[in-house]
Image (cartoon, rainbow, N blue to C red):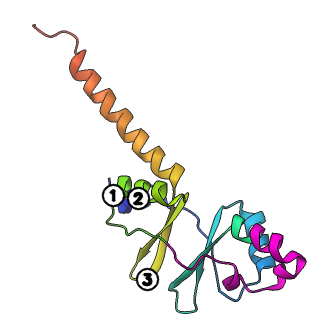
């Protein structure tokens, strides 16, 4: 299955902020929406980075209360690893595992169209495997056959 099919099944409700949003405003969004990552996009809609709860916690841990007034562009991760809608789910999961991240922005022409989480991708693969197993089982244990 490819990422585009996963998105078609269930879009995530991902959040974006502008690079000049303050760390405090971004932290409040995390609290309101209970999300783990927020995508940072410029006025042109192109992805510039991602900010995680960890990025905010580390900045506050290093700078204290002063960090909350800074723009989020100063604490975000700029070397964003992403995937495309045409990528398969397994390669996205391998990418996440290799890099130690739990979320990948899905980017098309520089714009984020969704964010895929590790959990969401695994759930889709699990459902597919369960269906495959059920189908195989029906072939093996078919009742009423002549042989």
Contact? badges 2 and 3 (CB < 8 Å): no
Residue 115 part of the magenta-drawn span? no
Q: Nearer the viewer, mark 2 or mark 3?
A: 2
Residue 35 on image: x %, y %: 67, 61
Res. 43 image quadrant = bottom right
Vertically, is 4 above or below 139? below
Vertically, is 51 above or below 99? below
Q: Indicate which disc, 3 or 1, sits on the residue closer to the N terminus.
A: 1
Vertically, is 122 above or below 40? above
The crowding category of the residue bearing disc 2, from other C-alpha atoms within 10 Å (few below 14, some 14 to 19, many at least 20), is: many
Q: Indicate which disc, 2 or 3, sits on the residue closer to the N terminus.
A: 2
Please, what secondary structure does the residue beneath circle 3 have? loop
The crowding category of the residue bearing disc 3, from other C-alpha atoms within 10 Å (few below 14, some 14 to 19, many at least 20), is: some
Judge by depth and name the residue closer to the eye, 11 or 41: 41
Contact? badges 2 and 1 (CB < 8 Å): yes
Q: Residue at x 77, y 74 (%)?
A: 59
**Which residue extends farthest bottom?**
44
Q: Main secondary structure of the magenta part?
A: helix
Q: Which residues are magenta?
A: 57-80
Residue 67 on image: x %, y %: 82, 80
Q: Residue at x 82, y 69 (%)?
A: 61
Q: Which residue is mark 1?
A: 88
Q: Which residue is mark 2?
A: 92
**Which residue extends farthest front?**
62
Please, what secondary structure does the residue beneath circle 1 have? loop
- Looking at the rendered structure, which numbered label has been put on residue 110? 3
The crowding category of the residue bearing disc 1, from other C-alpha atoms within 10 Å (few below 14, some 14 to 19, many at least 20), is: some
Residue 108 on image: x %, y %: 39, 77
Residue 15 on image: x %, y %: 62, 71
């Amino acid at each position: 299955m490819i990422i585009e099919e996963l998105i078609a099944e269930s879009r995530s409700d991902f959040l974006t902020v502008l690079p000049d949003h303050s760390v405090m405003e971004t932290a409040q969004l995390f609290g309101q929406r209970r999300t783990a990552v927020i995508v940072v996009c410029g006025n042109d809609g192109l992805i510039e980075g991602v900010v995680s709860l960890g990025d905010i916690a580390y900045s506050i841990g290093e700078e204290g209360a002063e960090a909350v007034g800074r723009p989020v562009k100063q604490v975000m991760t700029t070397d964003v690893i992403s995937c495309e809608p045409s990528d398969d789910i397994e390669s996205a999961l391998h990418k996440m595992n290799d890099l130690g991240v739990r979320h990948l922005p899905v980017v098309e022409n520089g714009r984020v169209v969704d964010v895929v989480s590790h959990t969401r991708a695994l759930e889709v693969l699990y459902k597919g495997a369960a269906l495959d197993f059920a189908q195989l089982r029906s072939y093996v244990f078919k009742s009423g056959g002549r042989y």
